[in-house]
């Protein structure tokens, strides 16, 4: 059986399995553990360093693991790969791989690899919990009460202390996300090398359904997990997807870094576009990018402010932006009229005009560009079937985002007084467009905009 499929079944992030299948899941979990153990054994280089205090054996995930003799020298240092557990806050827990140069330092000098329990923060408990669970894949974090109690405390405090008491507004969010997984009994953690072995093709978050609107794939949870892993290993390439605050990446061995780089290369290969991409191909790539962000555009806060919230921060600095702009050049929504019905002829292109605006690709001072985006949204709404609940739900999401993008224009409509009898008023054109934006994005019930093309004119 494909190891990735086994892994997917036992992941705690997936939908709970019915009770009648619990035994099957346990057997599959055991099969995964065997595969993981074999993989770890293959990776063990067997390098040994011997000092007067004892021998240290190198492991590609945990760094140097001491022999029992060396462990007795510093009994308060708790290595992830050992069975002993801390008893109090004076203990030192492993929170990073133990490197060769650290073997010859004093206990204080090992602060990078070990941390006093009393000083545990969210970052420390995440990597400490990760290392311990990778070392003991058959054990729940609850079997290490010291780590589990600290983890519980930080998960609770993190949300309480966040700006809006919401998970996705947290600093250190990728660390927090993985910590929550580590606390689940049915989540089986793996090293980066094991993840790479289990992932032949990097999964996508979404595929496209009717009207080119996004539909989550069966692998979406797995993709979210892999993205969190890669944010913690490759912040330069993946850090831009963490759209709230800052975070602290993991400290990894060179072997784990190499495996993470291979996993990242798989991800990047899956994002490559044909030389002349179609509007639909660009829609799929753009929606997959948006789903990667830790603050998803689909969960936009009603109170989000245009100066703070962006569906795609840094969008204008990407190749995706430049490619989309090239495809959209001189394009407009095209409708035809036949036997009393309107038909939107270029649905994907019209949709791409809207999504480009959502991602921040429109110059809000360019009135012609703004009008094109607003017209595209109106015509996209008109072409959606009035009974297609999923499509209408997505239109609500797009409209919320457009409302933020064009916030200044709508504010202008609500606060500026224009003498409409004076055609030469320099603000006339902007005021007319602002009124149109207000009507589409706030003044009208969305259901009044949907389905016009399905009704005889």
Image (cartoon, helix red, strand yellow):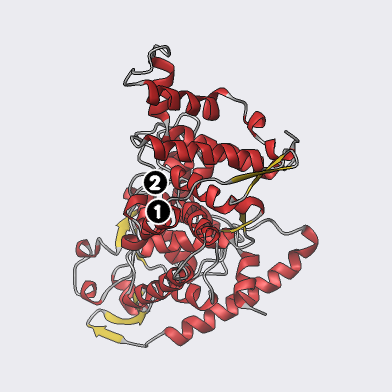
User: How many callouts does the rendering have?
Assistant: 2
Q: Residues within 10 Å of mark 2 (few under 14, many from 20)?
A: many
Name above or below for residue 287 compared with residue 311: below
Q: Position of residue 376 (x, y in %)?
A: 53, 41
Q: Is 77 drawn above or below residue 63 in the view shown?
A: above
Find disc 1 in the rendering and name its residue: 325
> Which residue appears farthest toward the right when viewing the image?
20
Image quarter of the C terminus: top right
Circle number at residue 361: 2
Q: Which image quarter is the N terminus in?
A: bottom right
- Relative vertical location of residue 429 with respect to residue 236 in this rendering, above or below: above
User: Marks 2 and 1: in contact by CB < 8 Å?
Assistant: yes
Disc 1 versus disc 2: distance between alpha carbons?
8 Å
Query: What residue lies at 53% left-to-right and 25% top-to-bottom?
Result: 439
Please tell me which residue is depicted at 24% across the width and 74% down the height of the picture.
103
Q: The residue tagged with tag 1: helix, strand or loop?
A: helix
Residue in front for this viewpoint, 157 or 365: 365
The residue sitting at 60% across, 70% down in the picture is 7
- Is 202 left, or right, of 113 in this rendering? right
The residue lying toward the viewer, choosing from 424 and 259, is 424
Classify residue 221 by image quadrant: bottom right
Locate residue 184: give its quadrant: bottom right
Q: Which of marks 1 and 2 is nearer the N terminus?
A: 1
Q: Could you tell me which residue is drawn at 45 percent across and 49 percent down?
A: 294
The image position of residue 373, as x and y in percent, is: 47, 40
The image quadrant of residue 146 is bottom left
Residue 21: x percent and y percent? 77, 64
């Amino acid at each position: 059986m494909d190891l990735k499929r086994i892994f997917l079944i036992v992941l705690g992030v997936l939908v709970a399995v019915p009770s009648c299948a619990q035994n099957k899941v346990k057997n599959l979990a055991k099969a995964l553990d065997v595969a993981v153990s074999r993989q770890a054994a293959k990776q063990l280089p067997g390098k040994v360093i011997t000092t007067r205090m004892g021998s240290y054996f190198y492991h590609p995930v945990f760094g140097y693991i001491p022999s029992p003799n060396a462990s007795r020298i510093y009994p308060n240092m708790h290595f992830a790969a050992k069975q002993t557990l801390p008893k109090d806050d004076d203990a030192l827990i492993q929170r990073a791989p133990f490197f060769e140069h650290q073997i010859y330092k004093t206990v204080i000098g090992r602060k990078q690899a070990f941390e006093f329990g009393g000083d545990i923060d969210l970052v420390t408990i995440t990597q400490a919990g990760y290392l311990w669970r990778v070392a003991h894949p058959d054990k729940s974090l609850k079997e290490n009460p010291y780590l589990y109690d600290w983890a519980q405390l930080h998960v609770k405090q993190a949300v309480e202390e966040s700006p809006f008491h919401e998970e996705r507004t947290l600093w250190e969010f990728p660390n927090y996300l993985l910590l929550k997984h580590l606390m689940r009994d049915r989540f089986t953690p793996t090293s980066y090398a094991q993840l790479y072995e289990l992932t032949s093709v990097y999964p996508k978050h979404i595929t496209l359904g009717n009207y080119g609107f996004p539909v989550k794939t069966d692998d979406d949870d797995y993709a979210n997990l892999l993205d969190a892993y890669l944010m913690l290993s490759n912040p330069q390439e993946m850090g831009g997807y963490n759209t709230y605050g800052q975070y602290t990446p993991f400290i990894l061995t060179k072997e784990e870094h190499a495996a993470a780089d291979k996993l990242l290369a798989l991800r990047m290969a899956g994002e490559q576009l044909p030389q002349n991409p179609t509007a639909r191909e660009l829609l799929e790539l753009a929606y997959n990018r948006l789903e990667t962000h830790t603050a998803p555009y689909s969960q936009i806060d009603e109170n989000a402010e245009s100066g703070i919230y962006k569906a795609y921060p840094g969008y204008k600095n990407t190749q995706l932006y430049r490619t989309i702009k090239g495809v959209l050049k001189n394009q407009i929504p095209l409708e035809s009229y036949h036997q009393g019905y309107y038909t939107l002829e270029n649905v994907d292109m019209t949709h791409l005009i809207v999504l480009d605006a959502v991602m921040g690709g429109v110059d809000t001072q360019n009135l012609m560009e703004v009008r094109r985006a607003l017209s595209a949204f109106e015509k996209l709404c008109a072409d959606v079937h009035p009974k297609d609940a999923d499509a209408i739900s997505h239109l609500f999401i797009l409209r919320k985002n457009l409302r933020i993008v064009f916030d200044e224009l709508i504010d202008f409509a609500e606060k500026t007084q224009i003498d409409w009898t004076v055609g030469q008023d320099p603000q006339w054109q902007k005021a007319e467009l602002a009124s149109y934006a207000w009507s589409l994005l706030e003044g009208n019930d969305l259901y009044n905009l949907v389905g016009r093309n399905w009704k005889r004119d």
